[in-house]
Image (cartoon, rainbow, N blue to C red):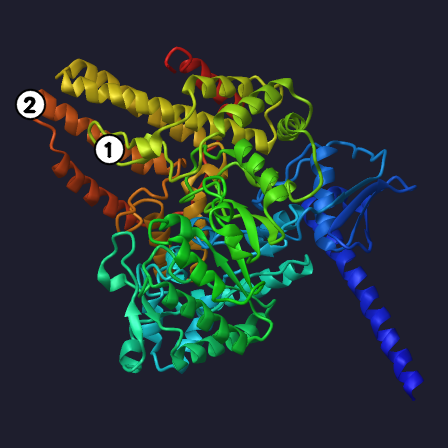
Amino acid sequence: MKRNLVIIFLCLVVGFSAFAKTNDVNTAKALTQRIIPQVSEKFVFKKISSPVDRFVLEDTKEGKIQISGNNANSMAMGLNYYLRYFCMTTVSWYNDIAVELPATLPIVKDQITIDAKVAKRFFLNYCTYGYTMPFWQWNEWERMIDWMALNGINMPLAITGQEAVWYKVWRKLGMTDTEIRSYFTGPTYLPWHRMANIDGWNGALPMEWLDNQVELQKKILTREREFNMTPVLPAFAGHVPAKLTELYPDANIKYLGKWAGFADEYRCHFLNPEEKLFAQIQKLYITEQTKLFGTDHIYGVDPFNEVDPPSWEPEYLKKVSSNMFRTLTAADDKAQWMQMTWMFYHDRKDWTSPRIKALLTGVPQNKMILLDYHCEKTELWKKTNKFHNQPYIWCYLGNFGGNTTITGNVKESMSRLDTALIEGGKNFEGIGSTLEGLDVAQFPYEVTFEKAWNINIPEDKMVEALANRHVGKVSKEAQEAWKILYNDIYVQVPRTLGILPNLRPVMKNNQDKRTGNEYDNKLLYGVWKKLTAVNDCSRDAMKLDLIIVGRQVLGNHFLQVKTQFDSAYSAHDVYALKARGAMMLEILNDLDSLNTYHSRTSLDTWIAEARNMGSNDEIKDYYEKNARNLITTWGGRLNDYASRTWAGLVKNYYAERWSKYIDAVTSATVAKKKFNQKKFDETMTQFENSWVNAKTKDNIETTPHSVSLQDYSEYLVTKYADKIK
């Protein structure tokens, strides 16, 4: 009998192992069928054993490309390596952009074996779910997960659908349907609700939103797990509805600090983790979430993000983290806590060393994983005694607010990362990226995740390869342009950055903290000129290069002309005012026209995604208002924080504001009166609110262009040749 049981057990083990191998191979095969269906049969995948993540590239005797890996994630990374460095192509993170391939697939002459340097590769940010992803459906998410796998990411933040879980919890604790959905913010603002910054803003959240997001999250998690990813799901961090103060009057519930200028009615409440109710809520949430989505036992728990805790005493902070973790493990005994450390940087005056140590050491060693969130600016591992030996992940942020401006000190950041890989300590466990929005160049994030593997291509060769794959072939002009971009333009530490056309007009104030550049605009103009001279600009990546660089050049130039306009006002020179005003409007027109050449640089795409989420006109209008609100007036004191240089937004919003400014200043000068900034700001508020509340009822159609993007870019380069100073 025992012998038979042993045989059965061995058969099950062998069977499961065979299934796992087949499953990984099938996942990799399905990836090729989605992104490169025209040549998917040319690839063979093989499962191998390895103590670390590894991929191997080689040709088969049948002339196919064999990609071996220890799991589907490694196989996907191997596929992307082949696409980048053999096929000279880029896989976009947008689903509507096809992967462009050479006519014949190149052979792999010599076997290539590459191992991962780190086990954990983290991606995403709470804010990305508001600034880019709020209206994504499965098609968009499917490509994003493919892109993550192709870049070796194996630990994505996965917070979709949590409101449906919270709905069940709050109902069980006595709240009504209306009370719960009014406690939630609108869909674009959910990240800041989830981080306990604001409640109720742009609510109430429709019930159909909650239901749809559950089904979407199930698909997301299934696919991520197929790619051997460990999704980071949320857990309870103390944020509770104000209604609980009435339902549980004896519970220790206090206000959190005010956030970003929002009124008290939107302020969040915090339940003390020592309360029995805290453990009850944690258990309810983890149980309900696990029923719906399963668990991978790593939970995002982020108390006190950009808000003051009820007490700054180290003893209190240590108790908070200790009790939070206790409730987490009571709900899931395998639980690990993932904590972003943004607050230690953002509120660095308050988060002193003793307070940081108290919060971190309240959790048992190796049960908390920290995200060193903004390493291109400040590497907290260097300032916190390596996070007091708690495991941490080095992260490149690179973008705030979804701003479309060129920013990022990529070269310096990669040098910092190289140092961290050597000196970061035994608790340095991974590399990640925490970008806030996707409407920017992909390359900083691709470069960051390549650093997680032993690819080790010399920096200059890496830049040349990047340029070549944007064109689809070797291009000296593109290489020269990208070397300037990499070495001299992408040098600015990321912050909330915009071009002046995207910001509300203010006399003699060009908001230098948001518009100042650490490079010469004439140098960037030279890059634009080199890109337009590339022999073939038909690749999608090249089109985006032309737009991203061109709109930055024009935006920088606009600042110069606006400065001249304000000087003309000071000199009471009506002729110069009218001339400079006309130039400003002309730049804005050119800026808008340039962005019409791509769907991903257009307001139409953002609005269409929002409206497509709704089942009827009322909900479509509600989603559209959320979409318009976030990228313009935002709320609180965050006006223009999430500015975007998009076709349609420039023409119908930014240019309208500037036209009103030019008219108001010119009229005041003609009448020999002082320009009234306060009165003008009131006019702006009325216009902005009116635009936010407008509705797009008609189907959105793209106007065909009479000339190619390359021809139009060449025209603009010539037009501004003598104007860029």
Residue neighbourhood size for the residue with mark 1, other residues' Cα within 10 Å, grouped as few (<14), some (14–19), many (≥20): many
Q: Is residue 565 visible?
A: yes
511 displayed left or right of 481: left
Query: Taking 41 as reference, is 190 above or below it?
Result: below
Depth check: give the residue in front, 13 or 611. Answer: 13
- Give the residue type at disc 1: Pro
- Give the residue type at disc 2: Ala
For residue 49, which quarter of the picture? bottom right
Image location (x, y in percent) of residue 531: 55, 21
Query: Taking 236 as reference, is 115 above or below it?
Result: above
Q: Which residue is mark 1?
A: 505
Image location (x, y in percent) of residue 5: 88, 83
Q: Secondary structure at mark 1?
A: loop
Query: Taking 717 as reference, is 639 above or below it?
Result: below
Image location (x, y in percent) of residue 674: 8, 27
For residue 377, which quarter of the picture? top left
> At 91% across and 79% down in the image, what residue appears?
7
Measure how far apart labels 1 and 2 are at the Cα level. 21 Å
Instruction: Select label 1 or label 2 by which is in front.
Output: 1
> At 67% across and 36% down in the image, what residue appears?
100
Disc with the residue nearer the chain's start (1 vs 2): 1
Query: Taking 209 as reference, is 61 above or below it?
Result: above
> At 53% across and 46% down in the image, what residue appears?
395
Residue 81's label in the rendered image is: none
* Badge 1 vs badge 2, beta-carbon distance below 8 Å: no
Q: Quadrant of the C terminus?
A: top left
Residue 671's label in the rendered image is: 2
Q: Secondary structure at mark 2?
A: loop
